[in-house]
Amino acid sequence: MTVLATYSIKGGVGKTTTAVNLAYLAAQEGARTLVWDLDPQGAATFYFRVKPKVKGGAGALVSGRRPLDDVVKGTDFENLDLVPADFSYRNMDLELDGAPKPTRTLRRLIKPVRAEYDVVILDCPPSISLVSENVFEAADALLVPLIPTTLSVRTLDQLEGFLDEHPARRPPELLAFFSMVDARKRLHRELMESLRAERRHVLDAQVPATSAVERMGVHRSPLPAFTRRGAAIDAYQQLWSEIRGRLGG
């Protein structure tokens, strides 16, 4: 089983749309796929038309009173399941802080479903927190969307610095890619060119800023499920292919 996390310190950069679309592509290829919506805002849960509710909330999961597989919900798509968001996740840092080995709790919670899924995707809230440290311990790779602007690149620097200063037992692969790209903007083009030249973990795939991605909220569905063509679909397919290549398939 491979655990991927869509993660960024900065909000509004395309984490959830990436998680939803990559999960759909993985499931369409036949991979048994699970999305865990860790963000209390519950956008991924909304896209998959599932109620954002976990009985007992974050406390029941972290304490082990409710195992993860007990709260898994099916979606409208074959091979694709969801652990929904819950508003109590806003307090998950507090719950984790009281757990034994608090930075390894998510890894422990995921372990019992390893035999049931090929791919687990964690859709993470924007922060650097105890939840983040759990994600770094649990994930095989961090998928980091970057808007090609100075502030977004700065958050990548901050993330790299944090990972260097707080190494996980088994550090995740860091895979960044450009999101919400407007290729007409000179700044976007220049930043993408320079960052790819400087950092080997920046992928070639770039997701454009298109209305098709915004319509996911109207259709409450992954992009390829309601439209079969477009630059954004091509970008997500390229991104998924690059991720698989970097992680050995």
Image (spheres, rainbow, N blue to C red):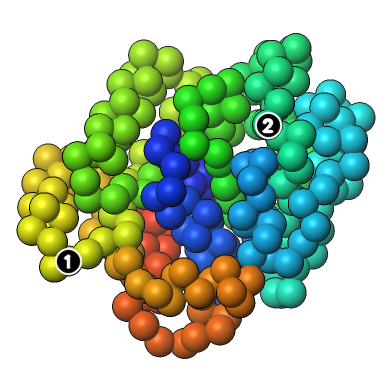
Indicate the amino acid at tag 2. Arg
Q: Is residue 40 left or right of residue 62?
A: left
Residue 90 rendering spot, x and y as whole percentages:
68, 31
| Quarter of image, res 217 | bottom right
The residue carrying mark 2 is 90
Whether residue 190 is visible to the viewer of this picture, yes or no, is yes
- The residue sitting at 64% across, 46% down in the picture is 41
Query: In terms of sequence position, does the residue under pointer 1 or pointer 2 come before the other?
Result: 2
- The residue sitting at 61% across, 77% down in the picture is 219
| Quarter of image, res 86 | top right
Q: Is residue 125 left or right of residue 69?
A: left
Q: Which mark is residue 229?
A: none
Residue 215 rendering spot, x and y as whole percentages:
50, 74
Do the residues bearing badges 1 and 2 touch, measured as CB atoms within 8 Å? Answer: no
111 over 146 or under it: above or below: above
Indicate the amino acid at tag 1. Ala
Residue farthest toward the bottom in the current orientation of the protein: 228
Q: Is residue 76 left or right of residue 195?
A: right
Q: Nearer the viewer, residue 152 or 97?
A: 152
Q: Nearer the viewer, residue 174 or 170?
A: 174
Give the SS element for disc 2.
Answer: helix
Residue 62 rendering spot, x and y as whole percentages:
78, 27
The residue carrying mark 1 is 183
Q: Nearer the viewer, residue 174 or 212?
A: 212
